[in-house]
Amino acid sequence: MEIRQTRGVVLRSTGSWYEVCDADSGNVYSCRAGGRLRLQGDRSTNPFAVGDDVVIEFHGEDEPPLIVERKKRRNAIVRRSVNLSKQSHIVAANLDRAFLIVTIASPETSTGFIDRFLVTAEAYGVPTTLVFNKCDLYGGQPDVTARLEYLEAVYQLAGYTTLRTSAETGEGLNELKAALASAGINLLSGHSGVGKSTLINRLLPGLELKTGDVSSAHQKGKHTTTFAEMFALPEGGYLVDTPGIKGFGLVELERDQLHHYFPELFAKLPACKFHNCLHRSEPQCAVRAAVEKGEIAEERYVNYLDLYENFEADTAYR
């Protein structure tokens, strides 16, 4: 029996089966992990993630192709596994950009959640755009609108690009399509209820992903996406849809390196008196001085301190 190998990209992962697109032919195969495959040092619950560059092996028409090798990842978005606190879960790999979908209300996305995601993205080298969704709901609510404008200013000051969108009215969809098309492989992520699936249905007409309502009692969304999956976009580029994330524990990071992943804090480090300043209570700290002057948003700085002080708890899922 002739054994044949080819390269491909994982389009969908369901835990035990993987849909892989053949890089040469474009054909999509349902594959299993090869029994003899060994991944050195891998402590994740999913050895293969959407976006992984893999080698698949064919053993005949009656046998499913096997994934026998995973090429080195350029980057990944990683979170703590929900039930296995000592293991990580790879959300997606080999990304050109992440788009974090957030909402000001119905439900509210906390800046603590946003900053944990951004720290992980910075640590693994994934540029991130913040997408403020459901903007059609904020009209006539001055407090909500003020909060939206404030958070846009906070994250733009930190160096992040922000967009406003509404799947209902179409606001910002052309800008989002253009950003997705220019980036290559894009991750769309966010916690449950932020309208991610509805946005994707507008970006990819005919896909008809399931959408869920937000609980009026708890202002929390319901999971409607079960597995991560990659789709080709009509305007170019690829979109990785992921299940809504309830919490985002930090993984494989060093506590004393946290400030490196807040770009606006790290930029001030050379001006601190001590080269290893952690920006907490050290004298002549340029970061604290910048916060007092309004050059760094106080809310971002407070979130950094919270992550630092609660680092051991935050490396667990939350």
Image (spheres, helix red, strand yellow):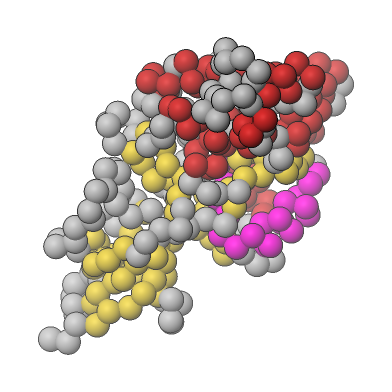
Q: Position of residue 234 (x, y in %)?
A: 66, 66
Determine whether, in the image, residue 195 is placed left or right of residue 86: right
Within the magenta stretch, is there residue 96? no
In which quadrant will I find the C terminus? top left
| Range of residues picked out in magenta | 170-194
Report the residue at 31% width, 63% height from top. 70
Within the magenta stretch, is there residue 188? yes
Report the residue at 43% width, 76% height from top. 23
Viewer-nearest residue: 221 or 85: 85
Q: Quarter of the image holding residue 71?
A: bottom left
Determine whether, in the image, residue 75 is placed left or right of residue 131: left
Determine whether, in the image, residue 74 is placed left or right of residue 295: left
Q: Position of residue 220 (x, y in %)?
A: 55, 23
Residue reaching furthest front?
273
Q: Reply above or below: 181 against 13.
A: below
Residue reaching furthest bottom?
2
